[in-house]
Amino acid sequence: MERKIKVGIVGLGRMGKAYAENLAWHMKDVTLIAACSLSQEERRYARETLKVTSIYKDYHQMLDTPGLEAVFVVSSTDMHADHMIWALQKGLHVFSEKPLALSVEACQRVLTIAKQYPQLKTSVGFVRRYDASYMYAKQKIEEGLIGHPYLIKSQTIDKDTVTDFQITYVNKSGGIFHDYNVHDIDLTRWLMSSEFEEVHAMGGAYKHERFAELGDADNVMTSCKLENGSMAVIIASRTAMHGHDTYTEVVGTLGSLRIGRPAGKNRVEIYDQYGARKECLDTFMERFEDAFLTMSNDFIACILHDGQPQCTIEDATKATEAAIAFTKSFKESCVVKLKDL
């Protein structure tokens, strides 16, 4: 009989439900035995829809669930670091949704504890690394197909349908750079094989003034210099009308790679009274549905076969460090050198 890893999950909001449904229904090497949420409605969902038997309001109680081996942390961003640390201290493997934390100090706390438990697997959910198109692009860069890559342009653009939720969540998410561009930051480090050296961010609350009142923005752009001399232009928007639009272009001395164009729902073109058009995806979950499942399966496989997760705590720390630099540059209207943070 094949062994199944007994897993618990903390956080059953929009993202948590997606992870939980994969764990409960779509992963052959997993048994979802425990779930934790502060919300009574979410606990009911875990019990009635997911058929989880051990349901908790208190995270520490969930960590004591008999037989529990691993935890998926999909709680609010400000709790990721603590939830990872507490799971590790209970001897559990732990996966966390991105970002790892909102400060380098919190990331370092997780790293320090993780080093005390080298037998335990840890990873952070930078899902685009597990998307088939991005993995193919990475392979082609490494093969030298486009020569020396010297410029990356990457964007995270969401359809303007969840503004109220995003406004409510700003104080816990860390803002648009941590919540959105951290994906583009990780892609840049991964695809360009370099760290950020200096950044200059700009933008504003062009459509929803409430973001400005909270010290955040609905549209931003950051120009960056990387340590290896290459360049990056990173964009985020919360106000797209056409749909979710993740796109990355890597330019090299012998060519370029474009990942995510056109931002279509499928390959169908519609010709009707509105003209010729393609429908777009509504959400990032639709765009990366397969990648989320691949990422979760990869983490479980690392536990079963003593592998090394692709995205490490060190990677997540670097991403947080860059997001902090982006945020500082935006708020202070200045160029930020990462060495000065």
Image: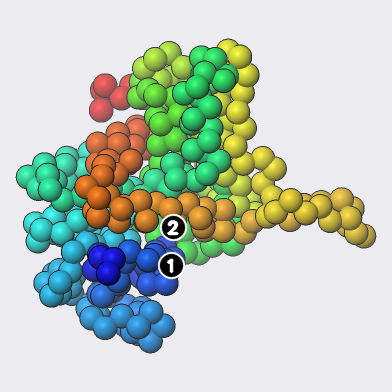
* Residue at the spot 89% in from the left edge and 55% down from the top edge: 271
- The local crowd at label 1, few if under 14, some if 14 to 19, many if 20 or more residues have their Cα within 10 Å, is few
**Residue 6 spot, x, y in % from top left:** 24, 68
Crowd around label 2: few <14 · some 14–19 · many ≥20 (10 Å): many
How is the model colour-coded? rainbow
* Residue that numbered label 1 is attached to: 26
Position of residue 299 in the picture relative to residue 247 (left or right): left
Disc 1, disc 2: CB below 8 Å?
yes
Amino acid type shown at disc 1: His
Task: Specify the farthest residue to the front.
Answer: 1
Q: Quadrant of residue 338?
A: top left
The answer to whether one can see residue 79 in this image is yes
Q: Which percent across, then down, holds residue 130?
A: 44, 45
Mark 2: secondary structure? helix
SS of the residue under disc 1: helix
- The answer to whether 152 is drawn above or below residue 260 in the figure is above
Q: Nearer the viewer, residue 320 or 31?
A: 31
Judging depth in this view, the residue of 126 and 327 nearest the camera is 126
Amino acid type of the residue tagged 2 in the rendering: Leu
Q: Residue at x 62, y 32 (%)?
A: 258
Q: Residue at x 25, y 50 (%)?
A: 305
Residue assigned mark 2: 293
Q: Which mark is residue 215?
A: none
Q: With 169 as the anchor, is 6 left or right in this view?
A: left
Q: Nearer the viewer, residue 118 or 235?
A: 118
- Quadrant in which the N terminus is drawn: bottom left
Q: Residue 256: where, in percent of width, then height?
A: 61, 23
For this view, does 247 lie left or right of residue 75? right
